[in-house]
Amino acid sequence: MDRLSGKVAVITGGCSGIGRAAVGRFVEEGARVLVADIQEEAGHELARTYQGHVRFHRCDVTHETDIAAVMATAADHWGGLDIVFNNAGAGGARAPIDEITGEEWDRTQALLLRSVALGIRHATTHMKARGRGAIVNTASIAGLQAGYSPIAYAVAKAGVIHLTKVAAAELARYAIRVNAICPGYILTNIFTASTGIAGETAERVKSELAKLAPHIQPVRTEGSPRHIADAAVFLASDEAEFVTGTHLVVDGGLTIGPRNAWDPGTPSPIREVIARAVKGQ
């Protein structure tokens, strides 16, 4: 397990959820990882857990100076920067388009889209010096279709998908690859944190969501942060050296099509109409 051996990586939002799983997987694969997050206690605990392999640097990704400092710290400490996983984020504003304020919109875009653009921008300074690099961005199936998230989040994630494509085009000349991952229904704290649910109620909600998870997509497996972390390892590794400017959907088949396409227990309304018409002939 050495697909990232000798590589230096930055993972934003690395203290919980998908980011936390990615830290573990990157270390397993031989990388040295700088964890960038606002959760200081959890960050220092990660550094102790993976002593010698992980460092923590406090970073609020809505602040450009924090992002630049994180990239420079990783490069200065380990002599370069090979991989950046722009993963930090949250649910953002939940208001619909006819109610959301400009301030709510801007905060969500700053957290979920602007931060990724600036992560790419400040990573490339060090990757160009290295002569190559791999950037992975966390997008979402919400950026592909309506119905999976509030509108501000969905638009930001759609932006991440297109940003990934155009950044890959611009950075190919420097041998820097840029790809995105579109997670589906992955059980993290985002479902409770974004709604203000906490404590015992949050734990109860997460337990119910865990029971629901295997039944909402074709693959009868609960989506976990580890599934996304595995995809990030692949895209960051040399195994994906011919992959750039694309998004990898990791959703258990959730976006394959309407439920009747994969669930025999859900009839197709169109087929039912046709069947009734045929019987009536």
Image: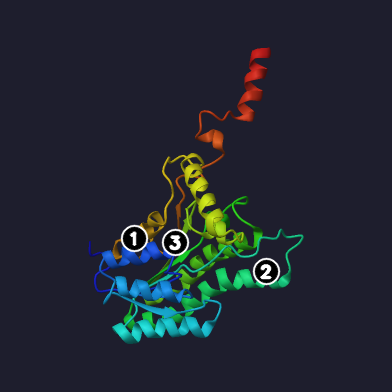
Residue 17 - label:
3
Report the amino acid beneath label 2.
Trp
Q: CA distance from mark 3 to mark 1?
A: 18 Å
Q: CA distance from mark 2 to mark 3?
A: 24 Å
Assign the C terminus to one quadrant of the image. top right
Question: At which x and y percent is residue 200?
Answer: 53, 55
Question: At which x and y percent is residue 280?
Answer: 68, 13
Report the amino acid beneath label 1.
Phe
Other-residue count near label 3 (Cα within 10 Å), few / some / many at <14 / 14–19 / ≥20: many
Front position among marks 1 and 2: 2
Q: Which badge, 3 or 1, comes first in the chain's sequence? A: 3
- Within the image, what quadrant is residue 171 found in? bottom left
Assign the N terminus to one quadrant of the image. bottom left
**Horizontal side, residue 241 vs residue 281: left or right:** left
Q: Is residue 191 above or below residue 74?
A: above
Q: Residue furthest front?
A: 200
Query: Mark 1 sits on what residue?
Result: 234
Front position among marks 2 and 3: 3
At x 42%, y 65%, the residue is 19
At x 64%, y 29%, the residue is 269
Query: Mark 2 sits on what residue?
Result: 105
**In front: 94, or 9?**
94
Other-residue count near label 1 (Cα within 10 Å), few / some / many at <14 / 14–19 / ≥20: some
Is residue 201 in view from this perspective? yes
Q: Which badge, 2 or 3, comes first in the chain's sequence? A: 3
Give the secondary structure at mark 3.
helix
Question: At which x and y percent is residue 219?
Answer: 43, 41
**Horizontal side, residue 76 vs residue 251: left or right:** left
**In front: 178, or 175?**
178
Other-residue count near label 2 (Cα within 10 Å), few / some / many at <14 / 14–19 / ≥20: many
**Horizontal side, residue 195 vs residue 75: left or right:** right
